[in-house]
Image (cartoon, rainbow, N blue to C red):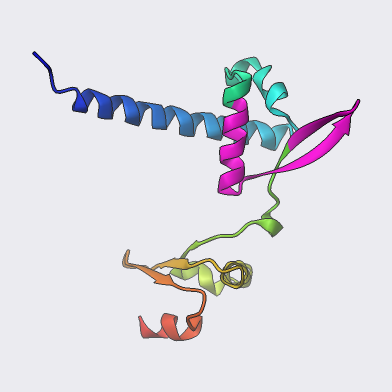
Amino acid sequence: MMQNLSPAHYVLKSKREKEKERRLEDIYDYLEEHPGQTAYSLSKIKRLKLNKETARLSLLELERRGDVKFVEEVELGRKKKIAYLTPLSESYFTRFNEESLTIPEARELLEKSRKAGYAVTIVRSDGREEEILPGENLDQKLVES
């Protein structure tokens, strides 16, 4: 007799996703306090509870998301990938609420993201979301809605 294990599988998968997100947040928070870490050095931090491979994969995921940048350093003939948080000036943002567009700095971040080829989502005050593609006229789109 085979039992239907799909609900249990779904629960396990969602639990692992939550653990992964918590782990990424913990690493990000640690890098805020202690920049310039390697996967090996993170694996030695007791409160993070990471092995070296998990630390390496987590750093790669943070790099993929754009939260971390690596700098390669050569020490005693060995290359080390040192992780630093990505500075705000090098980040791209793709979600803005309508009210934030009145702030010049937020508007500059929006334009920077569009110039880099990212589609931007504007969250209206009534909760609607509107996607603006890089080639579309931003001011015209904002007036239309």
The structure residue drawn at horizontal position 61% and vertical position 26%, both measured from the top left corner, is: 55
Q: In this view, does 138 lie above or below 103?
A: below
Query: Would you identify the image quadrant in which residue 76 lies?
Result: top right
Task: From the top left corner, tell me how far across and down residue 128 is, in percent.
Answer: 32, 67
Task: From the top left corner, tell me how far across and down residue 77 is, in percent.
Answer: 89, 28
The answer to whether residue 102 is left or right of residue 144 is right
* Quadrant the N terminus occupies: top left
> Is residue 41 part of the magenta span, yes or no?
no
What range of the chain is rendered magenta? 55-82
Front-most of 127 and 120? 120
Count the marks: how many? 0
The answer to whether residue 99 is left or right of residue 115 is left
The structure residue drawn at horizontal position 51% and vertical position 79%, both measured from the top left corner, is: 135
Query: Would you identify the image quadrant in which residue 130 lies?
Result: bottom left
* Quadrant the C terminus occupies: bottom left
Q: In this view, does 106 lie above or below 52?
A: below
Front-most of 28 and 117? 117
> Is residue 77 part of the magenta span, yes or no?
yes
Task: From the top left corner, tell me how far across and down residue 44 is, in percent.
Answer: 68, 17
Seen as rendered, the residue at the extreme left is: 1
The structure residue drawn at horizontal position 26% and vertical position 30%, both measured from the top left corner, is: 10
The answer to whether residue 81 is left or right of residue 109 is right
Q: In this view, does 122 lie above or below 22?
A: below
Seen as rendered, the residue at the extreme right is: 76
The structure residue drawn at horizontal position 36% and vertical position 27%, both measured from the top left corner, is: 15
